[in-house]
Image (tube, grey):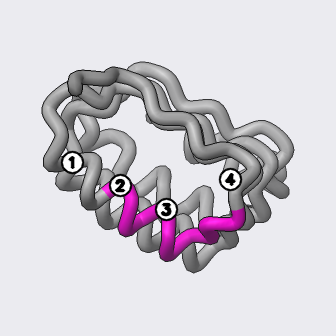
Amino acid sequence: PHFTDLRVKNNPLGGAGAASLLGAICQCEGVQELDLSGIGMDADGAKLLAAQLRQCGRVRRLTLSNNAIGDEGAGHLAAVLGECKALTHVEIADAGIVLLAGRLLLAL
């Protein structure tokens, strides 16, 4: 079956689980939207996810809201988001990010 959206929000995957999931999704040609809201991801999980994002060029929309990513995790994501050419929408509300990390993300 062909699907374009995957929403696993509010499941206790954590960052490592999300990175593994994204690694598998990168093999699927149709997935363009991924919602990882409220999965228990922290800064370390954001780092793992960022590494996978580099290899997954088809995802256009990524939602990471309601996770404890914080400034450190936002920095890991900001470092790779510019390389993700298909990615046009990133939502990271209520993730413990303060002004400085938010500016890094907006600079992309």
Q: Amino acid at mark 3?
A: Ala
- Say which amino acid is labelled 2: Leu
Q: Residue 101 at what x, y percent from top left?
A: 68, 53
Residue wearing tag 1: 26
Label 2, label 3: how far apart the Cα atoms are: 6 Å
Q: Secondary structure at mark 2?
A: helix
- Quarter of the image holding residue 21? bottom left
Q: Secondary structure at mark 4?
A: helix
Q: What number is the disc on residue 17?
A: none
Q: 83 and 59: which one is in front?
A: 59
Look at the numbered discs 3 and 4 and tell me whether their residues touch, using CB distance below 8 Å.
no
Who is closer to the viewer here, 71 or 40?
40
* 10 Å crowding of disc 4: few (<14), some (14-19), many (20+): some
| Circle nearer the N terminus (1, 3) | 3
Asked if residue 16 is positioned above or below residue 88 in the image, the reply reads below
Q: Indicate left or right for 99 with 16 as reference.
A: right
Q: Earlier in the sequence, mark 3 or mark 4?
A: 3
In the displayed structure, 27 sits above or below 18; it is above
Query: Which residue is nearer to you in this view: 3 or 49?
Result: 3
* 13 inside magenta stretch: yes
